[in-house]
Amino acid sequence: MEGLNHTIWDEWGALAPTPPVRDEAAGIMEGLSRSVEGEEQLFSSSRLFTVRRLMRIWNDCGWKSDGGIRLVRTQGGGRIVFAVDGAVVPEIFSVTQSMSRRRRNWNWVRGIFGSCGALYLPRAGYYLAMRPPLGSGAAERLQSILRSCGFALGVRKKTGCRELMLRDQQQIVTFLSRIGLVKTALDLEETAIYRSMRNHANKLVNCDAANINKSLGAAREQMALINKMDELGMTEELPAPLRELIIARKKNPSVSLKELGQSLPTPISKSTVEYRWRKLENMLKQQSKGDDANVLGKGGR
């Protein structure tokens, strides 16, 4: 997961600006928390790469501002605060506020994702989340764009933001491709294939281990039954098919029932082996109870 996190943000930060560049810049800024201080508006982000990209594409936006972006300070936890001329901010946000609710502005979505989005790969499943701050209308526009494209979107309100989530791996890949993060999308698909193969292998190993434990448990019970019958002197009086089964088990104390059946002079199926063991168990129970109805030496399948 750490490798995929590096991939996604390295790729996002290195993408060539796509005209109209101001759409992406507006998306980045609408995904950040902001406040007013004098004639400037302050924006803050804990992501240095986000601020760097905004500064890199700023000059391509053509906004009328002499000051541009001015770094103000850093706060605890590496949070960066920068200032923008308050006169240009309405022009920046007019880029998206004027667009139709159905318009699919992927430059703007890419900016939003870079400022308040994240990709998560927990032990099971996948999810991509974006948390635009409340009050600007960005969350509503983003929700409209994604739903108009057929994305199954989960939405919930959190403190100060609205969280929009994609949980389907294939839809996450589609979303990443739409905003230009093709390498990340391919890496995610590769990760999904690896996970699927690993999970399948683990299931096979667990299944094999369970079968082995089951076979060993059955073999231990059968050896205990044989020892009890030997103590009671029953073994020599058994019918030939049952005696052959006991001899085969003594020689092969850990093999499965299927393998045990195939080791007999006349190979038999697993179900026949199970039938004969049940017959031996019943004979031992009757003998232990002193039931004269049991007659050794007769019958046998």
Image: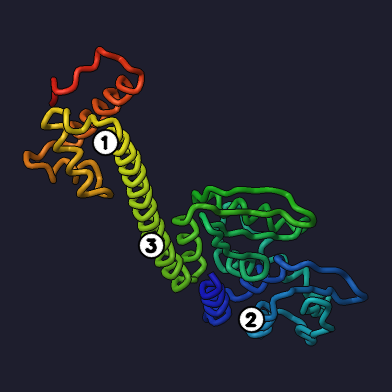
Q: How many angstroms separate mark 1 from mark 2 (CA)?
A: 83 Å
**Mark 3, residues whose alpha carbon is within 10 Å: few (<14), some, or many (≥20)?**
few
Q: Which dot marks residue 193?
A: 3
Q: Name the residue under label 1.
A: 230
Q: Residues within 10 Å of mark 1 (few under 14, many from 20)?
A: few
Say which element carries label 3. Answer: helix
Query: Disc 1 vs disc 2: which is toward the camera?
Result: 1
Above or below, 48 against 121 in this view is below
Q: Residue 103: tell me if it is visible.
A: yes
Q: Which image quarter: residue 270?
A: top left
Image quadrant holding the C terminus, namely top left
State the image quarter where residue 225 is shown. top left
Callout 3, which amino acid? Ile
- Front residue (pair 31, 1): 1
Q: Sequence-wise, which precedes: disc 1 or disc 3?
A: 3
What amino acid does circle 2 point to? Arg
**Residue at position x 17%, y 37% in the image:** 245
The x, y position of residue 217, in whole percent, is 36, 43
Residue shown at the point (54%, 62%) measured from the top left: 121
